Amino acid sequence: PLVRNLSQADGRTAARVFHVDSVNNRTNGSLNANEATETLRNALANNGKFTLVSVQQLSMAKQQLGLSPQDSLGTRSKAIGIARNVGAQYVLYSSASGNVNAPALQMQLMLVQTGEIIWSGKGAVQQQ
């Protein structure tokens, strides 16, 4: 539902390039952030309304900035810096919180140029 809400939130985002930042784990347990991020990326890609920065582009950009490809950026400012480096117009910053067995996902869509949060949503994660 959050991805659907995001796709309907703002006409400005249509056909724009998105950097999906790694999901930050703020739950009470161990969450596979890579798997959560990949699931989110797939949901956005399958929606058909978003163009995502490729994993390869992100890996190269991190390397250019002296970060390891597995580095979870963790802050909005780092995520925006990477997005600028790869030419993305938007960053999707996400964090999972609450009980690790039934986490809530909070997402914020930020405009790279200004850092402005143009959309925000929160909801329960649906297990597949």
Image (cartoon, rainbow, N blue to C red):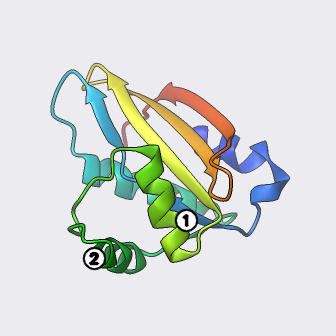
Q: Which residue is mark 2?
A: 63
How far is mark 2 from mark 1, CA to CA? 24 Å
Location of residue 56 in the rendering, given as x and y in whole percent from the top left corner: 36, 80
Which residue is located at x 38 percent, y 76 percent? Answer: 61
Query: Residue type at mark 2?
Result: Gln
Report whether 43 appears left or right of 64: right
Count of numbered circles in the view: 2
Q: Residue furthest right?
A: 11
Task: Name the front one of labels 2 and 1.
Answer: 2
- Pick the quarter of the image with the N terminus: top right
One can see residue 1 in this view:
no
* Depth check, front residue: 109 or 127: 109
One can see residue 35 in this view:
yes
- Pick the quarter of the image with the C terminus: top left
Q: Quadrant of residue 104?
A: top left
Secondary structure beneath label 1 = helix
Which residue is located at x 54 percent, y 50 percent? Answer: 92
Q: Which residue is mark 1?
A: 45
Report whether 118 appears left or right of 35: right
Query: Residue type at mark 1?
Result: Ala
Location of residue 68 in the rendering, given as x and y in whole percent from the top left corner: 20, 68
Which residue is located at x 35 percent, y 25 percent? Answer: 97
